[in-house]
Image (cartoon, rainbow, N blue to C red):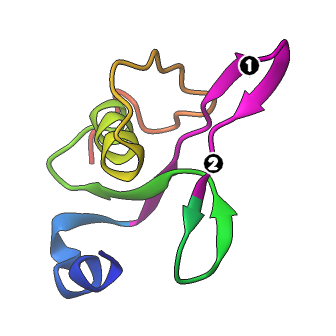
Amino acid sequence: MLKDIIDNNENYQPGLSIDCVIFGFHDNQLKVLLIKVERAKKWSLPGGFIPVDEDIDTAANTVLNGRTGVEGVFFKAICNLWKGQTK
């Protein structure tokens, strides 16, 4: 996946990535969704790079679904500096 992004970097926003923080409750405890990064053998937030043809909200859905298979999540941007701005 990373090699594809590096080889096709013109298709992605330069210097911009996204991480999704998904909160949930299970057994009356607050939980955060993490993914296991196989090569690094570490846990991580589901994240990725933003294609040039997607806005940040769409990219968040695309990244989350691609990394976890999760769909239909309500998103609220905590810090969204670029929404509504043009280049």
The x, y position of residue 65, in whole percent, is: 33, 40
Quadrant showing the N terminus? bottom left
Q: Position of residue 62 (x, y in %)?
A: 28, 41
Q: Is residue 8 above or below residue 66?
A: below
Q: Residue 14 occupies which quadrant of the picture?
A: bottom left
> Of helix, strand and loop, which mostly describes the magenta segment?
strand
Direction from residue 58 to residue 76 in the image, left or right: right
Vertical comparison of 38 with 13: above or below? below
From the image, tell me which residue sits under label 2. 34
Q: Amino acid at mark 1?
A: His
The residue closer to the viewer here, 61 or 82, is 61
Report the magenta residues as a range.
15-35
Neighbours of disc 2 within 10 Å: few (<14), some (14-19), many (20+): some
Q: CA distance from mark 2 to mark 1?
A: 14 Å
Q: Is residue 43 left or right of residue 39?
A: right
Identify which residue, 47 or 8, lies in the foreground.
Answer: 47
Residue drawn where x is 81% and y is 23% of the image: 30
Q: Earlier in the sequence, mark 2 or mark 1?
A: 1
Q: Residue at x 62, y 37 (%)?
A: 21
| Magenta stretch holds residue 60 | no
Foreground: disc 2 or disc 1: 1
Mark 1: few/some/many CA within 10 Å (<14, 14-19, 20+)? few
Residue 58 got which mark? none
According to the image, label 1 marks what residue?
26
Q: Is residue 75 left or right of residue 24?
A: left
Q: Residue at 53% across / 83% down in the picture?
A: 39
**Placement of 49 over or under 69, stated as above or below:** below
